[in-house]
Amino acid sequence: MAKVLIVEWDTVDAEVLWNEMRRAGHQPVAAFSVERANLMIEQDRPDAILLRWKLPDASGLSLLNDLRTRTATSRVPVIVLGEPDADEEECIRALEAGADDYVRRPFGIREVVARVQVVLRPVPHPQVRRRACVDALTMDFDARRVLARTGAAGEQIELRMAPTCYRLLRLFVENPYEVLSRKDIIQHVWFGAAVKDGIVDVYIKSLREALEPLRKTLVIETVRGAGFRLATAAPADAAHAAGAPAQLAMAAAVQQQAVPQTLHQTSPQVASAPMLRRSARRRAATGERARTAGAARQPTLVSDLGAAVEKIQHLQTLLQRKTEENRVLRAAVESGKASLRYTSIRQKNKR
């Protein structure tokens, strides 16, 4: 008798499968969601799982991937029950994700029972731990551990990672030095779920922070317009880049020391002391004029809103005062013209 977990959201199909497993001599249990299935897997430890492709709260493929990443459930037989409109691509994805078998709907109940009997046959598995190494990084898939060799003596430390970061790092480690697009990452890490491309950048940043102890040996490079790539760091290039500013500064200093000597050697007679003094005074005067003009052209910056309001009010007051002065001056001029005209008329009358 084997304990068979049926993960099926359709209650009618789940009841039919449950009855047939019972008649075949097995002990069936049923779950209608991925959350409930995870709980029952932890409690009951089933010997085989019948897993539907589409479930109400998540994809059956995501549950399958989680089962294969856990040490306790990495060898549990899983038969995926496909959808009626499924194509060959769905079957291939299920088998590549770690399914032991795939059955497309509509299926025969006796066929499903026979396939369960096949996957329950005892098969000897060699005790070989599944590991992958890239430079100083080692991933133990059976123990679900990430180990980093940080010192010259070969000591290793364990890096703590969230489940999504772990799946993302596993994808990079299984495909080192290859450019992975955002579409590829979503397909393998989120199992093709409808997520935005920006979420990939968020988890890439988190993964880079988790790999901080290995920054001298491994980096996740951003390939512009293509995606991301796990590659080894180049210490020689980094040292060269760090030393470049110092080399440029040294070259500039040497050039500054060489220019006066060359000037003195090539034209000792032309560059006499009076000429040099006049040239220096002209350069100083030109520089002072340029600085004065630049300062005059610079606008007045006001960083505070209250100060800006006071400045505007002050300018309005000055404008009103100037307007009033112009009006008084204009009135005085007009009155002066009128008195001159009156005086000239009186003189003409006297004559």
Image: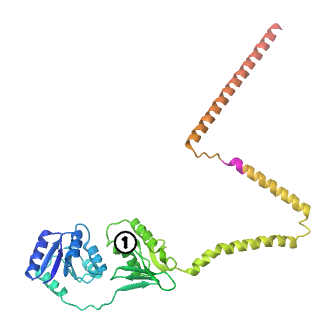
Secondary-structure class at tag 1: loop
Residue 287 to residue 42: above or below:
above
Decide if residue 45 is on the left or right side of residue 185.
left
Magenta highlight on residue 297: yes
Magenta highlight on residue 32: no
The answer to whether residue 285 of the structure is visible from this angle is yes
Find residue 132 and report its image quarter. Answer: bottom left
The C terminus is located in which quarter? top right
105 or 217, nearer to the observer: 217
Q: What residue sits 42% from the left and 76% below the top?
A: 159
Residues drawn in magenta: 294-298
Q: Position of residue 50 (x, y in %)?
A: 19, 78
Q: Position of residue 235 (x, y in %)?
A: 56, 80
Q: Main secondary structure of the magenta part?
A: helix
The N terminus is located in which quarter? bottom left
What amino acid does circle 1 point to? Ala
286 or 343, nearer to the observer: 286
Residue 331 to residue 177: above or below:
above
Residue 208 to residue 26: above or below:
above
Q: What residue sits 35% from the left and 82% below the top?
A: 141
Find residue 114 and report its image quarter. Answer: bottom left
Q: Which residue is mark 1?
A: 162
Q: What residue sits 70% from the left and 71% below the top?
A: 249
